[in-house]
Image (tube, helix red, strand yellow):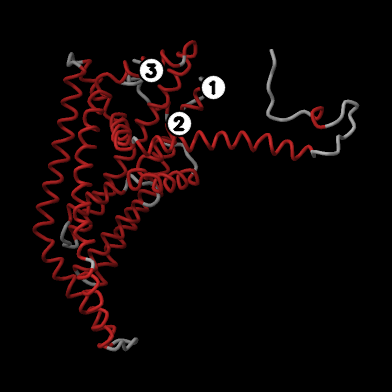
Amino acid sequence: MVRLSLRPSKKSVDGADGAPAGSIPYGFVLTAAWAWRLIAIGIVALAALSLFATLSTILMPMIIALIIAAPLEHLVTRMEKHHIPRGAGAAIVILTLVVLVLGLLVAAGGTIAAGFEDLRVQAVEGFNTFLDWLVKGPFHVDPTQITEWQQKAQDFLTKNWLGVANGALSVTGTIGAVFAGAVIALLSLFFFLKDGRLMWLWGVKHTTGDNADRVDNAGTAAWGTLGRYARTSAFVAMIDAVGIGIGAWILGLPLVIPIAILVFLFSFVPMFGAAISGAIAVLIALVDGDWVKALIMLGIVILVQQLEGSILYPLMFGKAASLHPMVILLSVSAGTLLAGFIGAVIAVPFISFITTFITKLRDPDAPAPGEEEEDGESLAIAPA
């Protein structure tokens, strides 16, 4: 059997008698050998990214559905043990999820409708106070200059009303795309919960041949890691939302439920999400009250995030993800650049899944992150 080596042999560079050929340095040959392979890998990666971008409206909802299915599939499995068919169990889980989400949206919409007008009035008053401070404060800005700035802003909006209208049409189109993506995600979620195991085995047996058992074992471990990560993320996000939401309620801030929902959603973005949602809560406290209320809200946000970062995150995420903070930082940054907020949310679980899959594929006996915590329940996509 002929074995190919990435490192060129000295014989190919030197003469037959071992003397240097003199024309091509060995380091140059080695660099060229690596270069063309890296170019080939880059071309394949670029083609894959281009294909993903073309099919993103279909693939992104399916990926989201897969991540949601990971922590929910054990509910369907438990219902199956109580003689409830997987199809009916999947429908019950999805219906419960939809009712919960719609209930939160209705509650948030009612809160926004009740408190947004008062918040808008207070924001206008705060802005006018800021303008007075610019005039009477240490900067002594000329009132005429402020009036000119306001006039320029109004003229800009008047001249670019067509762009504003196009933006409204773009928002309408985005809403339609979100609705279509939600339908794809719900349908995918149903089939992942109901027939995930069958789809996984079909794909493994038709693509891996004699290595089906090894790939199946790696997929089982990776699926378990994804489920643990999703459950841990949801728990930590709920702690953040409840803590900051209670703090906002105690301070008497408007939009408490929207603040809590926003904190919950942004908490799924590691490292950055909690800071962004906390800043929004502090800004609402500043608009609604004064600097004292904003500082108190800032203290509450810092306290909750310290609880998460110092206790919950190392205790739970270290076992669920088992990724270095630098890997998480790069993953979130790359996901944000490629797919915005959704990309930031799915980047870390995707990397965790791939890492565990490759680890178990190379060494089936290697422990997966948090694997010892599993209770042995069967998985919808992993082997029963």
Instruction: Point out the frontmost of discs 2 and 1.
Output: 2
Amino acid identity at mark 1: Asp
Q: Residue at x 25, y 49 (%)?
A: 241
**Mark 3, residues whose alpha carbon is within 10 Å: few (<14), some, or many (≥20)?**
few
Which quadrant is the C terminus positioned in?
A: top left
Number of marks present in the image shown: 3
Q: Residue at x 36, y 37 (%)?
A: 54
Q: How many angstroms separate mark 3 from mark 1 (CA)?
A: 21 Å
- Give residue 197's mark: none
Instruction: Point out the frontmost of discs 3 and 1.
Output: 3
Question: Where is mark 1, residue-wise?
Answer: 363
Tag 2 and tag 3, C-beta contact below 8 Å:
no
Mark 3: secondary structure: helix
Q: Residue at x 12, y 51 (%)?
A: 109
Give percent across and percent down for residue 204. Answer: 41, 16
Amino acid identity at mark 2: Ile
